[in-house]
Amino acid sequence: MCCCFSNFLYNQQFVLSVVAQPGGGGANLDRIFNQYAGTDNQLTNAELNRFWLHFDDDGDGEVSKSEFDSSWRQENFPNPQNAPLFFLELDRVADEVLNSQDFPHIFRLWDENGDGFITEREFRFNWNAYFDD
């Protein structure tokens, strides 16, 4: 869980507060969504595939567990200690890589209303459900 700090006065005393931000913090999640969603502010299947393939360091079209763990940490995504578990959850075909066989299933899970697009609300909700504590 990511935290941000804010200062405020309480009964004329200086108090430091910590505000928890689930799912890696709003700014990081907004950046991810906006980077891949395009101008229509929705993710298509192809756009979500591109997001997952950005973890593919060697460009072979498959994301290994090692690539996923490394990229997860480099992106400063939430709960890096759980990245191996996140990988296993996303590997729907259970072939120890994330690839074009896994992506359509992930897309259907995250496209809650089945309209063929993942809205920002659907993305944020599912991101937090999968990757938050």
Image (cartoon, grey):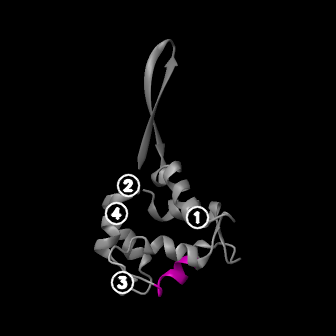
Q: Residue 76 shows which numbered tag?
A: 2
Percent x, y for residue 132?
A: 45, 57
Looking at the image, which is closer to me, 98 or 36? 36
As helix, strand or loop, the secondary structure at mark 3 comes to loop
Who comes first in sequence, dot 1 or dot 3? 3
- Magenta region, residue range: 100-107
Percent x, y for residue 112?
A: 65, 72
Q: Quadrant of the C terminus?
A: bottom left
Please indicate whether residue 32 sits to the left or right of residue 67 in the image: right
Kind of residue indicated by mark 3? Asp
Who comes first in sequence, dot 3 or dot 2? 3
> Tag 3: Cα neighbours inside 10 Å, few (<14), some, or many (≥20)?
few
Between label 1 and label 2, give the one nearer the viewer. 2
Who comes first in sequence, dot 1 or dot 4? 4
> In the rendered image, which quarter is residue 71 located in?
bottom left
> Tag 2: Cα neighbours inside 10 Å, few (<14), some, or many (≥20)?
few
The residue tagged 1 is 123
Distance from label 1 to label 2 (Cα)? 18 Å
Kind of residue indicated by mark 4? Asn
Kind of residue indicated by mark 1? Phe
> Tag 4: Cα neighbours inside 10 Å, few (<14), some, or many (≥20)?
some
Our reading of the magenta stretch's main secondary structure is helix
Using the image, determine if residue 91 lies above or below residue 81. Answer: below
The residue tagged 3 is 60
Kind of residue indicated by mark 2? Asn
The residue tagged 4 is 82
| The furthest residue to the top | 12
- Asked whether the residues under the numbered discs 1 and 4 touch, taking CB atoms below 8 Å apart as contact, a structural biologist would say no
Between label 1 and label 4, give the one nearer the viewer. 1
Looking at the image, which is closer to me, 89 or 115? 115
